[in-house]
Image (spheres, grey):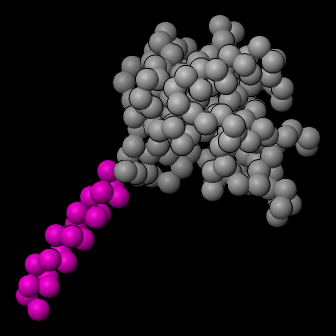
Amino acid sequence: MKTLHKIILPVSLGALGLIMFNSYSVGVPKGAKVVKNFDVKKYLGRWYEIARFDYRFERNMDNVTAEYSENPDGTVRVNNKGYNYVKKEWKEAIGEARFVKDKTEARLKVAFFKPFWAGYNVIDIDEEYQYALVAGSSLKYLWILSRTPNIPESMRQRFIEKAKKLGYNTEELIWVKHNQ
């Protein structure tokens, strides 16, 4: 019995450590560079999700928006909202984003269920802060965002090409409908 405890405890702690390590994955995908000279004040406000991969937490969602506002402590409040067209109901998730380093570097971590943080990296944005390409910590996470429910074809192509060069399978992107 003592031998079993000597094995189970280290294995359990190791597994827990691995889970905790993976839950704090806030890196940048290999080859990607985050936007420098980032202006968070210009980024605040409403963004429409134009495209994404099929994530469990956004499955069957259309009309997805993200609203970013500044908290008094300098962190960013994240309010994601979308319509589940299968369940015919609106869903909302409120989280918090923090800069990983400097506020002028568009590398953030976001949590909807603390202490579990995920990477949020703005890897391309137009000069007017109207369109953004956002990557998670790996090639599994990618979003195309716009200030309006539509995006010009030139920006769409710019973001698709950049994502392909980084290794994203852009054929798997879901193009989000905005009809409500």
Q: Residue furthest bottom?
A: 1
In x, y percent, where is residue 53?
65, 43
In this view, which residue lies farthest toward the right? 179
How far across and how far down the image is residue 171, in percent?
A: 69, 37
Q: Residue at x 80, y 46 (%)?
A: 62
Q: Considering the image in quadrants, where does the C terminus appear?
A: top right
| Main SS of residues in magenta | helix
Q: How far from the left and from the top, in percent, is residue 77?
A: 58, 37
Please tell me in which quadrant of the rendered image residue 78 appears: top right
Of residues 71 and 81, the one nearer the viewer is: 81
* Residue 18 falls inside the magenta stretch: yes
Q: Is there any visible trace of residue 78 in the rendered image?
A: yes
Magenta-colored span: 1-21
In the image: residue 46, left or right of residue 95: right
The residue under the point 51% across, 37% down is 139
The image shows residue 140 at horizontal and vertical percentages of 54, 42
Q: Is residue 76 visible?
A: no
